[in-house]
Amino acid sequence: MSDRWYSEAVVYCLDIDTYADSDADGVGDIRGLIGRLDYLARLGVTCLWLHPIHPSPNGDDGYDVTDFYNVDPRFGTLGDFAELLHQAGNRGIRVIIDLVVNHTSDQHPWFVSARSSPDSPYRDWYVWSDEEPADRHQGMVFPGEQHETWTYDRTAKSWYYHRFYKFQPDLNTTNPQVRAEIKKIMSFWLQLGVAGFRMDAVPFIIERTEPGDPNPELDFEFLTELRQHVQWRRGDAVLLAEANVEPDQLPAFFGDRGGSANRVHMLFDFMLNGRLMLAMARQDPEPVIEALRDTPALPEGGQWATFLRNHDEIDLSRLTAEQRNQVYAQFGPDENMRIYDRGIRRRLAPMLGNDRRRIELAYSLQFSLRGTPVLRYGEEIGMGEDLALPGREAIRTPMQWSYEPNAGFSRAESEKLVRPVIDKGEFGYEKVNVTLQRRDRNSLLGWFERMIRTLREAPEIGFGSTTHIDVPMPAGVLAHRADGPTGTMVFLHNLGTDDAEVDLSLLESEAELPIDVLADRNYDDVGKLDKLKIAGHGYRWIRLCRSWSV
């Protein structure tokens, strides 16, 4: 694919039901989202990632789908969705949607038919076992909430497989009919105008599951098929995959045909995410340096998607037990802040003590590292979490637009809201909202707008190569660079609390006029690479310029 728009995108992810309610029924909807597109455009968003939009019983926040060819009637109609795509496109915003095809809801007509009779045409669309599988208590995605991956169905008189909750039976993706249906689903939404898909649970989609086999083979050629199909339907469409696997497995998800990626275009960088959390907890950049060093090289056209927070817990499963405990101690000290024995169910601002300098530092570091940044709704204003809500709902509260009732999210009575707004404490909507921050140029929202604008003027980050600058550094300071066809950017981030001075004189031959393009303050040492100051929890983005290029 020649159009690599995704390499310079700013991705913003949201749940429609908690973003903006236009009809006062307490549930966010497509029309409400359309009304907020100007806000997203001003923020600098170029790609909108929507969490599940399909009809669902909502046992798992929409990830249990009953109809892949429609939108949840609570959100609106297909006509509303088409209008969203049109209006977003007018503002330079592409839209991608969650593709949840590892499983369906147990209320999906396919499964209802499949369980009704061994002769059902949909029986082999799911994974069954006549005998109790020996591995039925292995491989749970939600330990503590989920106790098995095979459940006996009395109507079917057989066991069915489910990597997730028991109301989410897995589709049998080794069945050619299922594969054809998945391609048909993708074609439908691409024809409607979506720019691609965030593919949920990709390693499980390509499993060749057999009863009693806890380590099934992965069929990567199915990803090759999907990539070919998507490119045939829409040449610039993107596949963004969720695959939280060991680093040595990652290249297979991108594929490599003649040096170019031929499977998914993008992967979420889970390894970097865990290392960022560890680095911030320790106030030591070494985990990030290790991530930059250990991450596999990408084929042409492949791209990482970086993130600090998303719609799920912060997954620390790729850290050691000791490292996890270090992160827990700093960012999830209370048991109710943790989930699934591997993660933290909090937003970033409260994790960092609502310290504006640390919040800016964290996002400056994320946005300056290799790849395409993904931003979770509400992070741009420093929203908090509601730990009184169950599980991951704690970080899925309504967007806080104003100090009006229900945070300006909805005109419905508060008891009718899809989820309660945060209305108490320092993160309550009267203190944290878009309206208040819009009035203050120096607000966190204003800072995000400036930072994203600077990012979009630095294509080296998205298209170039990112490397650690390996010279002696003061404690807590990370120096890295991004090199691309358009030039070079150098970045300094001080994870520690003490001010420091950095010597980057080795770069003097590359620049006559090093210029700060983004920093936590005005530094008076511009042009002096041998004595660069950096404040505690400070950051600097420096463009290396020749005099003729200014």
Image (cartoon, rainbow, N blue to C red):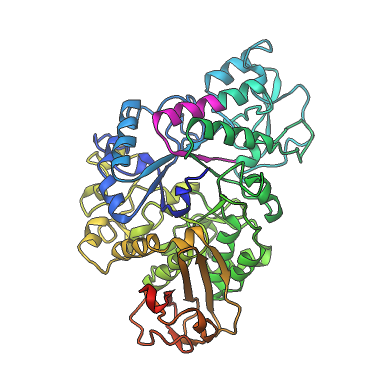
In the displayed orientation, state which residue is furthest to the front. Answer: 548
**440 is higher (above) or lower (below) than 258:** below
Q: Quadrant of the C terminus?
A: bottom left
Q: Position of residue 129 (x, y in %)?
A: 74, 24
**468 is higher (above) or lower (below) than 42:** below
Q: Is residue 437 left or right of residue 177?
A: left
Answer yes or no: is residue 273 visible.
yes
Give the residues drawn in magenta, as a range: 183-201
Residue at screen point 61% across, 40% down: 202
Magenta-colored stretch includes residue 207: no
Closer to us: 19 or 36: 36
Residue at screen point 61% across, 73% down: 286
**19 is higher (above) or lower (below) than 347:** above
Closer to us: 415 or 291: 291
Magenta-colored stretch includes residue 188: yes
Q: Position of residue 426 (x, y in %)?
A: 32, 64
Closer to us: 144 or 122: 122
Q: Position of residue 298 (x, y in %)?
A: 62, 54
Q: Is residue 235 left or right of residue 173?
A: left
Q: Is residue 381 left or right of residue 254?
A: left
**491 is higher (above) or lower (below) than 383:** below
Residue at screen point 59% across, 41% down: 201
Q: Quadrant of residue 34?
A: top left
Q: Position of residue 13 (x, y in %)?
A: 42, 47
